[in-house]
Image (tube, rainbow, N blue to C red):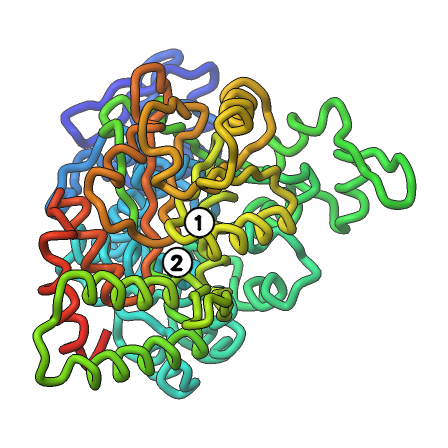
Amino acid sequence: MQIIENKALQLRVRDPSQITRIIPCSEQIGAHDVLVKWGLEEAQVLKNLKIKNVPSPIRKSYAWPGIHRPFTHQITTSEFLTLHRRAFCFNAQGTGKTASVIWAADYLMTTKRVSRVLIICPVSIMGSAWRGDLFRFVMHRTFDIAHNPRQEKRRQVIEGDAEFVIINYDGVEIVRDSIIAGGFDLIVIDEANAYKNVQTRRWKTLAKIITPQTWVWMLTGTPASQSPSDAYGLAKIVNPEGVPKFFGSFRDRVMVNLNRFQWVPRPNATEIVYSALQPAIRFSKEECLDLPDVLHVTRDVPLTKQQRKYYDEMKQQQLFVAAGEEISAPNAAANLSKLLQISGGAVYSDGKEVIEFDCSNRLQALKEVVDEASHKVLVFVPYTHSLTMVAGWLRKQGHTVEIINGQVTPNKRTEIFNRFQTTPDPRILVIQPQAASHGVTLHAANVVVYWSPVMSVETYLQANARVHRAGQVNKVTIVHLQGSGVESKMYKMLQGKVDVHQKLVDLYKEELGETDE
């Protein structure tokens, strides 16, 4: 296939009339050659005719706005999406697929194919990922977040004039009618495994807001990772012709029922799932040669009502005690530690008892990261009481987990590290950073999650080095979970290699002076 003067595509095919009958702006120029106008509709038709390597005209006529130039794999991903009204993007976590989607959507807006975009995603990435990338890459567009305890506020955003609207999964049902009337002709579903079950109200609500004309792009780095049958709900949205009408029929194709409680995949399940989840594009981080070796990602995790109540009470109490007195570094460290512990979901009382708070938002964000991870995961939890809670919760989700802290003997620690590096289980290590920040190689993992920030730059850098070191063959993603102002400031300091200990008093004073996080 050749591009002629950036205006036409020249193809060599067995039967040119197959193309000239369907595409008006085409002409046979030889026994097996045909010239086709290089437009979006024409490229889409050629793609539907199963002609390979059809380039999208986004390559010739789009300026790729934003503060960063696109990587090669991002251009290819955007190109693919513009050619498919319904499609999957299975690019791995950390490959920049949000930017690819934004550019593709902006191009469709520029060419008048799309007027409004609805982005459905987890709460934890509404602001840090989607709103942040919209600002970075399409500053000329208008965008807003429909996430507010008051239903009317959500409705106002949906019924407003923002070109991009971001909403969480369960918020869709709350304002379903407004969405249907809102003129959204492109719907993007991020971390789409949330829609794997067709029996849920969440899935049924999504199905009701999609029309045959709606563009739908579903994103996830780990499709059907837990069971081949999980592909059914995703395929039913994007490629309904590729799966049976009923879930039971699809499950019988990909699974064998051993007994009342146990189903196992059939030998050909992978091929059936692959066929069902089409059209699709996927880049692993290892295929993206232009990506940096380490990517830092922030997930905003709102404090729950209970956490917020005690966080604010603790601040007021500390403010009262500090009034008129000079704050020492030890006091600043101790008081910041209390605020960090509440943010993380568990705190020591004055009587040395552990008080646990509802931290369901943070646990859900952790689940999202773990589910998207293509390899093993390290979760760094600075406080022992939170560490035990996090590990127990992950085990309840079905993951194999080991704990590393100061109470684990050196011999036991060595045995756990060896199994982590050489065997499938454990998949996750929940680690107190100080207990594994030096001299340990853990490059079987390629995702590092900070449950909350540490107070030492050295500990932070050394902990990251457990994964990003000689022998690592995968790109590394470091994820920061943050829900309070002090956490956000500390992560920025750690990434900037600012010694937190030297700035503790200033950081604490700044936190006490805040009226809004």
Q: Quadrant of residue 167?
A: bottom left
Is 234 left or right of 470, judged from the image as shown?
A: right
Q: Earlier in the sequence, mark 2 or mark 1?
A: 2
Dot 1: element: strand
Furthest residue to the front? 351
Residue at 28% over, 49% down:
454
Q: Quadrant of residue 441?
A: top left
Q: Nearer the viewer, residue 257 or 233?
A: 257
Residue at 54% over, 18% down:
422
Dot 2: element: strand
Density class for disc 1 (Cα within 10 Å; few <14, some 14-19, many ≥20) is: many
What x and y, as percent, mark residue 358? Answer: 50, 70
Q: Point out which mark residue 293 bears.
A: none
Furthest residue to the right? 259
Which amino acid type corresponds to the residue marked 1 in the rendered image? Trp
What x and y, as percent, mark residue 56? Answer: 29, 35
Is 37 left or right of 370, judged from the image as shown?
A: left
Density class for disc 2 (Cα within 10 Å; few <14, some 14-19, many ≥20) is: many
What x and y, as percent, mark residue 401? Answer: 57, 39
Is 164 left or right of 209, judged from the image as shown?
A: left
* Residue matched to label 1: 217
- The quadrant the N terminus occupies is top left
Q: Nearer the viewer, residue 140 or 315?
A: 315
Q: Is residue 13 above or below residue 314?
A: above
Is 335 left or right of 137, judged from the image as shown?
A: right
- The quadrant the C terminus occupies is bottom left
Cα distance between the residues tagged 2 and 1: 8 Å
Q: Could you tell me how many numbered marks the image carries?
A: 2
Q: Point out which mark residue 186 bears.
A: 2
The answer to whether residue 17 is visible is: no
Label 2–label 1 contact, CB within 8 A: yes
Which amino acid type corresponds to the residue marked 2 in the rendered image? Leu
